[in-house]
Each structure stands twice: as structure tokens, then as C-alpha cells.
Amino acid sequence: MHERRLYGLILVAAGTVLWSLAGLFVRAIDLGVWDLILWRSIFACLCLLAVAVARPTGGSGFGWHGCLAACLSATAMFCYVAALTLTTVANVLIIYATLPFVTAALAWAATRETASRRLLGASTASMAGILFVAGTSLGASDIAGNTLAFAMTVSFGALLVMTRFYRSLNLGHVNAAGAALCAAVALPFSSGQMPTFDTLALIFLLALLTTALAFMLFLVGGRHVASSESALIALLDVVLGPLWVWLAFAEDPGQGTMAGGLIVVTSVVWYFWPSLRRSYGR
């Protein structure tokens, strides 16, 4: 049992590290946002289909809920890449770190699922952190990027709520369909020019490492550890993402973003701490 849990922790951590590289790749790729979204979505679709074939995860029919889930996935993918091109990686990831609280709010709105006082308190503090980040990022580009980052978080939160209540959904197929839809939306707005081989190689690595492999590692590892542990390990993305970009491109997130990020991360850790202690106490 201990070995399986350790195995799961390693896989979840590896998936999180791969996720954290997304901002680094986006900064390294010199391409217009629509072209970047188009080619990233194409490669992501192919890589996700390959993962679905290599490691089937069950799930059957698509139906209307599968189509809606694919639309939510496409929205999240589009907003994520677009946000990274408009504001700092730190801003995007700090806003994304509020996912547990956004998901809880959506679950309440959809099913009137009650929220604990601890969740409400952590959500309030987390939202204060986001407002702090937004208040210190008043440039037009930052405002647009922060808005897209929040839209991405809401879309992904809604997708998580759907997968909870429609367990027949195959996440690999849903995300592959979402990537295909995202590519179809971006195609009319793209330049129509073929990127260079080096650029295509970087985009392929972006899709392979930060989408397909990260998804597979997190999915497989998450089966062997508590969900609270997975959520806390995923917070490494908030720290590592800006770190890689700072090391490679000297992108300074700013003191306001760092302070707001500290509030958000502290809120999430505080919320999951009791579950984490119970997990380790077993």
C-alpha cells in the first residue's frame, strides 16, 4: 500500500512539473496567438487520442453532455493559451489556483451542494488574493489576460462538475474533441502560413508534455493518492510555472502578484490541511 501511494505521488508530481512548463513554451514560441492556438490544438488532439488508445480509461457514450463537456474543454484550452500571451505566467496560474473554490461554487449553483464554513472562508480569502493581483495589474493587456484566466478556471471547473455527475464521460475523448473544436475555431483567424520546423517542434512538445503526458501521469497517479494530496501537489504549478519563465526570460511577476499569490496558495493549503492530515494518519 505504501509503495502504491509513493508511486502515485511521484506520478502526480511529475504531471504537475510538466504542466508548469506551459508558460515557458508559450514564451519561447514566436507566433501569433491564433496560429499558436491552432497548431497547439491540432497537436494536443493527436496526442490525446494517442493517450486514449494507449491507455483506455473507460467511459462510453458522448451524447449532449459529451458535446457540452468538449465545448467547456475547448474554452479552457483557448483561454489558457490566450491568457499566457497577454499577462504574466504568475497572474494566470494564481487565478487558476482558485479552481477548488470555483468548482465548489459551480457545484452549489448546479445542484445546491452545500459548502462548509471552512470552504466559504478559504474561498473568500482566495478571492481577495485574486482582487489583489487584479488591482496591481491595471494594464489593458493584463486586465484582458486576467479575465481570460478566470474564464479558463470557470470553464475547467464546470468540466470537473460535469465529470462528477456524468461518470460515463471519457476525459481523454472529451479533451481530444475539445482540442479539435478549439482548432476549428482558431483556423479562420490564423495567418494560414506554415510555421518553421523549429516552431512546430516546440508546439508539438508543448502539446505532448503539458497536455497529453501531464494528463496521463496525473490521471494514473491520482488513483493511488487522496484527492486532497493531488490538489496540494498541483499547487507546485503556481510556484514552478513563474519560476521557469523568470529563469529563462527574466519575467518579473511583481510584488503585488507575489503577495496575492501567497494569499491564494495559503487559502488552498489551509482548506485542504485537515484532509491531508487524515490521509497521513491512516
Image (cartoon, rainbow, N blue to C red):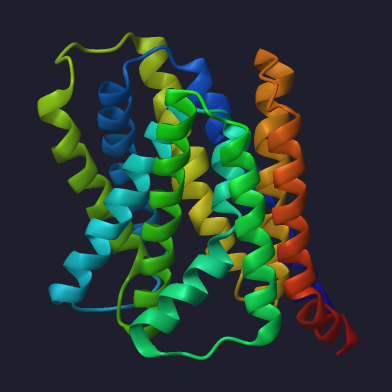
- 81 relative to 224 in the view: left or right: left
In which quarter of the view is residue 32 placed?
top left
Quadrant where the image shows the C terminus:
bottom right
* Above or below, 70 relative to 3: above
Residue 182 appearing in the image: yes
x 26%, y 25%: residue: 34
x 57%, y 68%: residue: 100
Quadrant where the image shows the N terminus:
bottom right
Residue 49 appearing in the image: no
Q: Give the number of callouts.
A: 0
- 216 relative to 172 in the view: left or right: right
Q: Position of residue 123 (x, y in %)?
A: 62, 68
In which quarter of the view is residue 269 placed?
bottom right
Q: Nearer the viewer, residue 217 or 259?
A: 259
In which quarter of the view is residue 147 placed?
top left
Q: Nearer the viewer, residue 40 or 238?
A: 238
Farthest right residue?
281
- 187 relative to 136 in the view: left or right: left
Q: Position of residue 133 (x, y in %)?
A: 62, 40
Farthest left residue?
188
Q: Position of residue 150 (x, y in %)?
A: 45, 50
Q: Position of residue 267 (x, y in %)?
A: 73, 63
* Above or below, 279 relative to 238: below
